[in-house]
Image (spheres, helix red, strand yellow):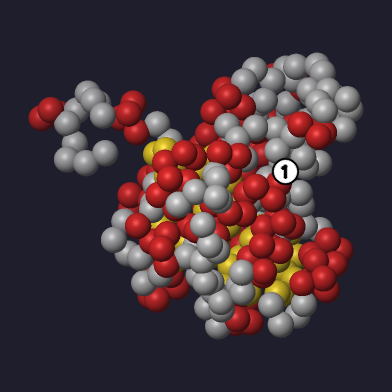
Amino acid sequence: MSAPDLDGRVALVTGAAGGIGQPLARAFVGAGMRVALCDTSEDGVLRLHRELGPDRTTALPMDVSDPASCRGSVSRTIAHFGRLDVLVNNAAMGMSTVREDHMRRVVQIEDISPDLWARFMAVNLSGPFYLAHAAVPGMRAQKFGRIINVTTSYFTMLNPGFSPYGPAKSGLEAWSTSLAGELRGTGITVNVVVPGGPTDTPMVPDDGSMERNQLIRPEKMAPPMLHLVSDAGGDVTGMRFVAAKWDSSLSIADAIAASGAPAGWPDLARSPVWPGGGPKRI
């Protein structure tokens, strides 16, 4: 399966200085794309900007939990590159923010302050909305856009001790399905990509609870995304892809079949209690 021709396409990647964001940015630039590198770590995005080159990237320190910062990053990306084609909502807070030993001792509700809960929701759920809210009008005008939200495994969403990370990501998953439906037919697609399990990033503590060589490599996230942001990916929306199951040696159709499924929980919405027998569309 050959890499799609993406020369000149413009992407904004949040969490670009982190464990998944860096290989994504490198893969996008390697495919010919131009990338706005967004992260709270100014030093991190500047280092990556120097590595990947000023002709292909711009460094935008920002906080996804701040609506004004999100609007500014979208505006600065368009001002710098002339357009915005792709939004990858990758930035997130992980459970180590609650407690470093969360893999060894199950986090309890008493460990989570209301302020910390609100911060998780602001970064992991509201941030993607703020960025999409700023980006969609321009994408509508050009009749082309790709939004990719990074959520997590269903196991993690529901697993005891993974709150508030899991609930925030489940909200992002549900909203991805809803937004995909809203934007169907506009030229803008919305999809979800997840690693498929614990990934070799700083979100998984290096405390001996897991063998690092058995973790999913963050680079696995790039191949399905490269297809989704291409012209050929325009027929795919409202889907979730497990990156660990994406096999680049297969045809596109077979790779999608092996790793993809509808995002969210659409089967649970098929038979709602509704006046008149049901809504026209779910």
- Side (left or right) of 112 relative to 184: right
At which x and y percent is residue 111? 77, 22
**Residue nearest the viewer, comparing 257 with 266:** 257
Q: Is residue 175 visible?
A: no
At which x and y percent is residue 82? 55, 83
- Side (left or right) of 11 relative to 140: right
At which x and y percent is residue 201? 78, 42
Q: Is residue 6 visible?
A: yes
> Residue shown at 42%/67% (left/top)?
231
Above or below, 94 against 139 in this view is: above
Count of numbered labels shown in the rendering: 1
In this view, the residue farthest toward the right is 207
Number of residues whose C-alpha sits closer than 10 Å to that of mark 1, classed few (under 14), some (14–19) or many (20 or more): some
Above or below, 74 against 195 in this view is: below
In this view, the residue farthest toward the front is 249
Q: Which residue is mark 1?
A: 217
Quarter residue 140 falls in: bottom left
**Residue nearest the viewer, comparing 275 with 30:** 30
Determine the secondary structure under disc 1.
loop
> Residue shown at 56%/39% (left/top)?
245
> Residue shown at 67%/70% (left/top)?
29
At which x and y percent is residue 247? 55, 45
What is the three-letter code of the residue carrying label 1?
Arg
Above or below, 183 against 202 in this view is: below
**Residue nearest the viewer, comparing 122 with 8:** 8
Quarter residue 262 falls in: top left
- Quadrant of the drawing holding the C terminus: top left
In this view, the residue farthest toward the left is 276
> Residue shown at 63%/65% (left/top)?
28
**Residue nearest the viewer, comparing 126 with 197:** 197
